[in-house]
Amino acid sequence: MTSQVSRWVASWPHPLTLEMAASRIEAARKLADAGDALPFGVIEKASNALIGFLTINRDPHERRRASLSYWLGEAYQGKGYMSELAPIALEAGFERLDIDIVEAGAQPANAASFAVMRACGMRPTREAMVYAPSRDQVELCQFYEIRRKQYRGMV
């Protein structure tokens, strides 16, 4: 995790220690075991290196709703990795988590993230101020979403 990646990601701080990463992975495993998340490590085929992370997390208050979040290392951005993975992850999320709506959000200047959302068929829905623990501040985010029935029409 570099500062250039962390600046766009609300909850992955820079610097990210090995202990912090291990804790996040363990938390993701527990949520997955409980049926409340689908975490994906993004692996580059050529090098077998971990290059990013994607997760779909069920909303604890609205069980038929989930959030999509993701990041890629700097050297791997702009190569289509996330636009390829995110739609596959969405399909798995709708089916395995049995959810109806998936939402994703990003800061207004994060054009790459909005391109991923659009590649998934997501459409803009709202803006909101969101607390970003990685920067300990509240930030404006734009949210996109897609419903299960819309997604099924795409595949």
Image (tube, rainbow, N blue to C red):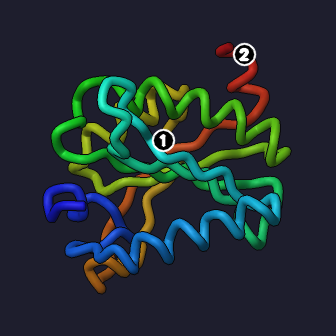
Residue at x-position 25% and y-position 47%:
73
Please name whichever residue, 144 or 24, is drawn nearer the observer in this view of the structure. Answer: 24
Give the structural element (helix, strand or loop) at label 1.
Answer: strand
Give the structural element (helix, strand or loop) at label 2.
Answer: helix
Name the amino acid, label 2: Gly
Residue at x-position 42% and y-position 27%:
83
How far across and how far down the image is residue 129, in percent?
40, 72
Please name whichever residue, 44 or 79, is drawn nearer the observer in this view of the structure. Answer: 44
Circle 1 sits on which residue?
124
Residue at x-position 65% and y-position 58%:
57
How far across and how far down the image is residue 86, in percent?
51, 34
Q: Nearer the viewer, mark 2 or mark 1?
A: 2
Circle 2 sits on which residue?
153
Name the amino acid, label 1: Pro
Residue 83 in view in this figure: yes
Residue 129 in view in this figure: no
Query: Which residue lies most toward the front here?
Result: 47
Quarter of the image where the N terminus is located: bottom left
